[in-house]
Image (spheres, rainbow, N blue to C red):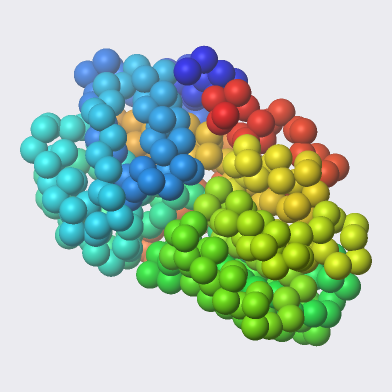
Amino acid sequence: MKSRWIIPFAVAALALSACGSSSNDAGATGGASEQETTFGYSIRTLDDPFQALEATAVTKAAEAAGITMLPVVNANGDAAKQNQDVNNLLTRGISGLLVNPIDPDAIVPAIEKANSMGVPVVTVDSTSNGGDVVMDVTADNAQAGAQACEVMGDRLGGTGTVLNLQGSLNNDVGIARSDGFTECISEKFPGIEVISKPMNWSAQECAQVAQTVLSTSQVDGIYTAASIICTDPVNNVLQQLGRSTPTGDPSHVVHVSIDGSPGGLAAVRGGTLDAIISQPLDQFATYAVYWLQRAVKGETAQAGPTDHNSTVVEINGHLVDQLPVTTVTTENVDDPSLWGNQPSAG
């Protein structure tokens, strides 16, 4: 997969060959050679297109850094299977473990098992509520929700009713994206009523919930926690109900989402999606591998700013590298730096 994604991965790999330190600069390294390092990756599901792309990106990032990467293990949305998957990876003598947890509580025994074996752990795009995790690498999901709120509030003029299609509410990402949105609406746009319904990261549930609510309530705006899952199902429902009109039309239902997938960017261009909050999928991969590689070499991380435009903060006892998100509208939808515009994303 030759693409612009390889550029940041290669840069990260080169940066990791510089002198070691305990700060958050991308030049820290030292210790055993990358060729002797093997990583395992347990992902919550490959049915979600975003997670499938992330799995590919992580593998490419590891390869670019000279690390042996075992085939990504798919938990298929089953928390018990994910724990068993991690145990199986640990029996294969991996140097470091990457995990995209299904459930932040259910994954704790697996994290603790890795800890007991001296295998450092980095979580990707989600977190664990226990165990010793070197770094959570994720977007600032609450901020993403707040940025979606700003667009929604402005487009609706501060009044109306919005359907909030939440992700899973046993998942930190789903909770943060919903809370960031609703708290911002309450604070800045009190004239907007929010109807919150979970869609559990399911395209089918997106369609079912949208159909039910839009058929029984006056809805002026829709906020979805994942464009790659919900954009097409929601737009199909709007078409079936005769409510699919482009942005700028007086009867248009304002639609804002998160992810930044190619399909989501195309919907922004086509006028069926008002805005999308793009999270940096490519950087998830680069910096998950970066932090884990440092940990394998015995280096430590600390809270504070990084040189990759993020800030490491401590949340619930874990260090979190909160990567910035970008609000995308028709004005910047063609920006080549957006992951959804990069050739490998197609």
Please state the horizontal and vertical placement of residue 258, each as a whole percent of the image: 62, 54
Q: Which of 277 and 94 is in front in this view?
A: 277
Which of the 4 image quarters holds residue 52? top left
Closer to the camera in the image, 180 or 333: 333
Q: Is residue 18 above or below residue 159?
A: above
- In-front residue for pair 47/41: 47
From this view, report whether residue 338 is shown above or below residue 324.
above
Q: Residue 274: x and y, percent? A: 77, 55
Which residue ends up furthest to the left in the rendered image? 91
Q: Quadrant of the C terminus?
A: top right
Q: x, y (%) of residue 140?
A: 57, 55
**Label total for image:** 0
Q: In this view, does 213 lie above or below 241?
A: below
Asked whether, in this view, residue 324 is left or right of residue 36, the answer is: right
Residue 148, visible in the rendered structure: no
Report the residue at 46% width, 42% height from top. 49
- Residue at screen point 63% across, 41% down: 263
Instruction: Report the side of 275 relative to 230 (left or right).
Output: right
Point 44% across, 65% down: residue: 200
Residue 262 can be seen, yes or no: yes
- In this view, the residue in front, 301 or 163, is 163
Residue at screen point 38% across, 57% down = 127
